Every structure is written in structure tokens, then in C-alpha cells.
Image: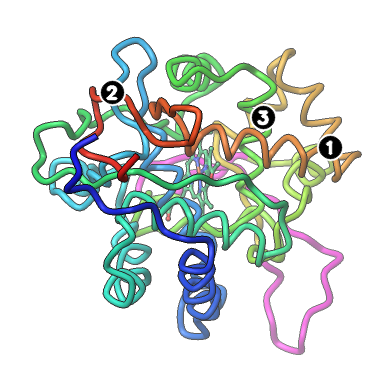
């Protein structure tokens, strides 16, 4: 490693960054009151470009800072997540964007009541867009299980891992002006739980065509207590979410995670940790050593 690279941060330094992320999660004016869900999506989209065959893409590089990746319609809305984190980057300039985006998601999952995800630093930021992966590597929500396998097998995941990763849709919502889909999957979208799987199985989901031509699945929760004058809220599922029910290999995992929250938390922690590491090759001390999509690294 060239000696001009920065020394690895101490755990006390990392704790300061985590505290700063915790402090910004509460955003009363934004969405459902939390930056957490969109931060989780930022980390997922930064890592989910990985292609195991060519060893390109992945969370290293923070390529979404460049139009080539940041302007991908699949990444619409993630500028909000990057903007939430900008003051943290300004306060702690030693952390790379690539590390900060992943760490922020790990903090957000935990703070929203989810499991502790193992995280290691050392990612570097690209200094131009030449190594940014091509667009089109992220999933298209209008499709089905063949597409899910095509996308997630490319990253090196199996069927169980696809279902566990999809449980992130316990969090957040769809925005008409971002993806074109509308609404949230669960009633409490800022609390990490296995509710998504339970709702998938329990409810009678009806296809609904939106004004923009997109189709999603909806259900009105009649049991939720409403204030006077409040309309019952519609919950939603994407076509890709529904394919977890209709696919014979995916469905048993939906059933297991619906019944066993601890199993889901353990599997989610493992698979989300794996997602954030895609494309990174580390030596015994944890330093990133592969050169293909990595520039620099910490001092070894
Ligand atoms: Fe997702 N996701 N996602 N997703 N996702 C959306 C929102 C969020 C798909 C499509 C969409 C994962 C997998 C898939 C989160 C986390 C994860 C939206 C709505 C669409 C569309 C965006 C918008 O309008 O703002 C599809 C398709 C897949 C798939 O094929 C499996 C995974 C693996 C994760 C993860 O984190 C592990 C989160 C969180 C959100 C909520 C964002 C927000 O702003 O709120």
C-alpha cells in the first residue's frame, strides 16, 4: 500500500461518526419522520451494482457522487440520503463517502430496532467516474422471480438470501416522484421487524394500476385504529415482492421469516453484512487489497 494513504480510524473515531449518524436520524419534516429508511436504501444501491463475474461495482468508490451512477433513474431520491450525511462527512473528513454510506445504514438498521450488522471500513472513493459501473444493474420492481434471480445471482446471492434481503421493505416507502410506485409496505415503516413477511402472507393483495401505468398490489388495513376523519391507509407490495409468494423456492423462506423474527434478524444481519462487502478483498488485518475497483486504502 502506498504510504500516502490515511491510517485506519480508531474505534473511538468510528464511534463519533456513529453518534453523528444517530443524531440525524430523527427528521420530523421528512417522510415518516426518519432518515433511516432512505439511508438503508443508499447503502443497498451503492453495493447492489456488484457483478461477481467481472468483479466490478459494489460499495467501494461511492460512484453515486457522479452523474453516471447518481443519475441512474434507479437511484432517484437517494440524493436526499446523501444530503443527510453531508454534514457528517464535513465534520469527519477522514471517513470516505463509501464507508460512511455503509456505516450509516448499519447504524440506521440498529437504531430502528433491527439487528447488529457486522461492518468493516477501508473503502475508498473514486476520484473520477472511470470505474463507475454501468447503469441497469439494480432490480426492476415491475418484474418477477426470474428477474430477481438474474440480478441477485449476479451478485453471488442464493434464494434464501434474496428473501432475507427483501425484508428491508419493512422500512420506508415508495415515492411517486422517485420510482413511480406509491406507499409503504407496513404500518410502522421506521421500525425494523418481520411484519413485511406476515403481511405478505396474511393479506389478500389486489392489483392496482396507477395513473402512470405502473401496477402494484394494495390492501387496506381495516384493523388499524383511526382518528376521527382519518382515511384508512392502503399498504402496498411491488410485483417483485409478490413474486416471493408465488415462487416455490422463495415462499418457504417467507413463511419461516413470518413466524420467526429472530431467524429473520440473524439472516438479515448476515446477508446485509455480505452485501456491503461485495467486491472487497481483505487481507488478514482487514485491509482491502484488491486493485480492480479500489483506489488506495488505509496504511497497512
Ligand atoms: Fe427496495 N425499493 N427494492 N430494497 N428499498 C424501494 C424502497 C426501498 C426494490 C424496489 C424498491 C431491496 C430490494 C428491492 C429498500 C431497501 C431494499 C422502492 C421505492 C422500490 C421501487 C423507491 C422510492 O420510490 O423511493 C426491488 C425491485 C428490490 C428487489 O428486487 C429485491 C433490498 C435488497 C433492500 C435492502 O436494503 C437490503 C428501502 C429501505 C426502501 C425505502 C426507501 C425510502 O426512501 O423509504
Left or right: residue 229 versus residue 225 is: left
Mark 2, Cα crowd under 10 Å, few <14 / some 14-19 / many 20+, is some
CA gap between label 3 and label 2 equals 24 Å
The disc, 3 or 2, on the residue closer to the chain's N-terminal end is 2
Residue found at x 23% / y 22%: 292
Dot 1 or dot 3: first in sequence order is 3
Determine which residue is flagged by label 1: 263
Q: Which residue is mark 3?
A: 163
Q: Disc 2 designates what residue?
A: 56
Q: Nearer the viewer, residue 44 or 295?
A: 295
Q: Earlier in the sequence, mark 1 or mark 2?
A: 2
Horizontal side of 243 relative to 210 (left or right) equals: right
- Which span is picked out in magenta? 207-233
- For this orientation, the residue located farthest to the right is 259
Q: Is residue 237 left or right of residue 292?
A: right
Q: Is residue 22 above or below residue 219?
A: below
Q: Is residue 48 left or right of residue 87?
A: right
Amino acid at each position: 500500500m502506498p504510504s500516502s494513504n490515511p491510517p485506519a480510524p480508531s474505534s473511538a473515531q468510528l464511534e463519533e461518526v456513529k453518534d453523528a449518524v444517530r443524531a440525524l436520524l430523527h427528521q420530523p419534516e421528512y417522510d415518516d419522520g426518519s432518515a433511516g429508511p432512505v439511508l438503508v436504501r443508499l447503502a443497498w444501491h451503492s453495493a447492489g451494482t456488484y457483478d461477481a463475474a467481472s468483479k466490478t461495482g459494489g460499495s467501494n468508490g461511492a460512484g453515486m457522487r457522479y452523474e453516471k451512477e447518481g443519475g441512474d433513474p434507479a437511484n432517484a431520491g437517494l440524493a436526499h440520503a446523501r444530503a443527510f450525511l453531508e454534514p457528517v462527512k464535513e465534520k469527519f473528513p477522514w471517513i470516505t463517502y463509501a464507508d460512511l454510506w455503509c456505516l450509516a445504514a448499519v447504524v440506521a438498521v440498529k437504531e430502528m430496532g433491527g439487528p447488529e450488522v457486522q461492518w468493516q471500513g477501508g473503502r475508498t472513493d473514486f476520484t473520477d467516474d472511470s470505474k463507475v459501473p454501468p447503469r441497469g444493474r439494480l432490480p426492476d420492481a415491475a418484474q418477477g422471480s426470474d428477474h430477481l434471480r438474474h440480478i441477485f445471482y449476479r451478485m453471488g446471492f442464493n434464494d434464501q438470501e434474496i428473501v432475507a434481503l427483501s425484508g428491508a421493505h419493512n422500512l420506508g416507502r415508495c415515492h411517486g416522484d422517485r420510482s413511480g410506485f406509491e406507499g409503504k409496505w407496513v404500518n410502522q415503516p421506521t421500525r425494523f421487524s418481520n411484519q413485511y413477511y406476515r403481511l405478505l402472507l396474511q393479506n389478500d393483495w389486489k392489483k392496482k394500476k396507477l395513473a402512470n401505468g405502473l401496477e402494484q398490489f394494495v390492501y387496506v388495513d381495516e384493523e388499524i385504529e383511526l382518528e376521527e376523519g382519518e382515511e384508512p391507509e392502503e399498504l402496498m407490495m411491488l410485483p417483485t415482492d409478490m413474486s416471493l409468494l408465488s415462487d416455490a423456492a422463495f415462499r418457504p423462506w417467507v413463511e419461516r421469516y413470518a413466524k420467526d423474527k429472530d431467524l429473520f434478524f440473524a439472516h438479515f444481519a448476515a446477508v446485509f453484512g455480505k452485501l456491503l462487502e461485495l467486491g472487497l478483498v481483505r487481507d488478514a488485518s482487514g485491509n482491502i487489497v484488491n486493485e480492480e475497483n479500489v483506489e488506495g486504502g488505509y496504511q497497512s
